Amino acid sequence: MRIPRAAMEAFKFSALISWRSTGKQQQTIARCIEKTGRALHSGDLSTVRIWPELAGTGRYFDFRSLLIPASIDFAEDSPLCTTLRKDGHSVRTVEHLLSALEGTGVDNCRIEIMNSGSDDTSVEVPIFDGSAREWVEAIDQVGLTDAMDCNGRSCDRVAPYLTQPVHVSKGDSVIAAFPANETNISYGIDFPQVSDLSLKWYSSSFCTGSFYSKQIAPSRTFCIYEEVEKMRSAGLIKGGSAENAVAFSISKGLLNPPLRSLEEPCRHKVLDFIGDVSLFARRGSQGLPVANIIAFKGGHSLHAEFVRKLSSTS
């Protein structure tokens, strides 16, 4: 196993991050994945094809031959989702797919997306049931294989180890991370207007891809029913329904039971966080930091700020 010279140039050591070998080789999918589903915000039908890719390439989107790396350098703030933009073209709602790829260890792949709508400058990843489960099942079906570089050689997979405490915050929302020998995530939410969503927490250690697949990937996105019309008036969630979100009402509680786990909303926040922090990955590396991470009342914007904080010093 080896790390290409070009990749080593990308892994500059700093006081905050140390890139270390995981003892594993970079992976890609064994063959193409193709899935079609409804996009959450546009409501369009969307077809995604995920292709195997060379080691050291990383994950990237191919939008009409415009290549958009799954990197924080191309992330922009957008309502209720994570969007990547380059040269006036954007890929929306990438977080669940990227979470599945990061969580199952697909380090290198090319992702093509085609939407049925008339917008030729923006595409959106389908929402399916609001979780990452269908992506994980598709990845499991084709399997993983060692990714080889252009010379037919495997490459070492490295991970970012946090070496000093770091935090970002906005109002009463905060993400703090501390050095550790394994990745631990504790995520809290607090929507006091809904008793079922008031001050809830979920904590876990991430040791294997199977833990992600079983404990995190099935967790669906959630919403507050009384806010749905406001979001639709803003041109969002045109494809949203009870089939792709867990809905809570201020007065009636959970509207479409049962939950898949008692902490499903918090687990979904972890799912989103893994997808957003995967944007820290470089040249086939792991994106999720090895650290003890505590997040409270976070969202896509704060997740991105956390990754930018890591990126600015590494």
Image (cartoon, rainbow, N blue to C red):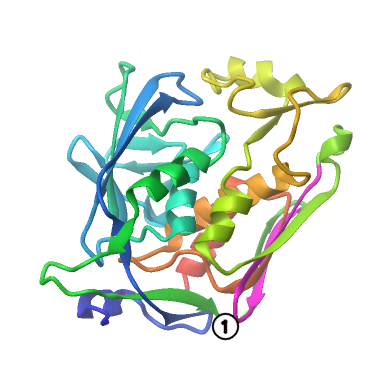
User: In the image, what residue type sits under mark 1?
Assistant: Thr
Where residue 219 sits: x, y (%)?
A: 63, 42
Residue at the image point whose x is 50% and y is 43% from the top: 96
Where residue 132 sits: x, y (%)?
A: 52, 42
Residue at the image point whose x is 29% and y is 53% from the top: 109
Q: Is residue 175 part of the magenta span, yes or no?
A: yes
Q: Which residues are magenta?
A: 173-190
Quarter in which the C terminus is drawn: bottom left
Most foreground residue, 51 or 76: 51
Quarter in which the N terminus is drawn: bottom left
Residue at the image point whose x is 74% and y is 22% from the top: 225
For the question of whether residue 314 can be seen, the reply is no
Q: Quadrant of residue 3?
A: bottom left
The residue labelled by disc 1 is 163
Rendered position, 242 above or below 311: above
For the question of whether residue 269 can be seen, the reply is yes
Determine the main secondary structure of the stretch shown in magenta: strand
Where residue 9 sits: x, y (%)?
A: 28, 78
Residue lying at the far left in this picture: please name it: 151
Q: Is residue 171 left or right of residue 117?
A: right
Q: Is residue 14 left or right of residue 91?
A: right
Where residue 63 sits: x, y (%)?
A: 25, 37
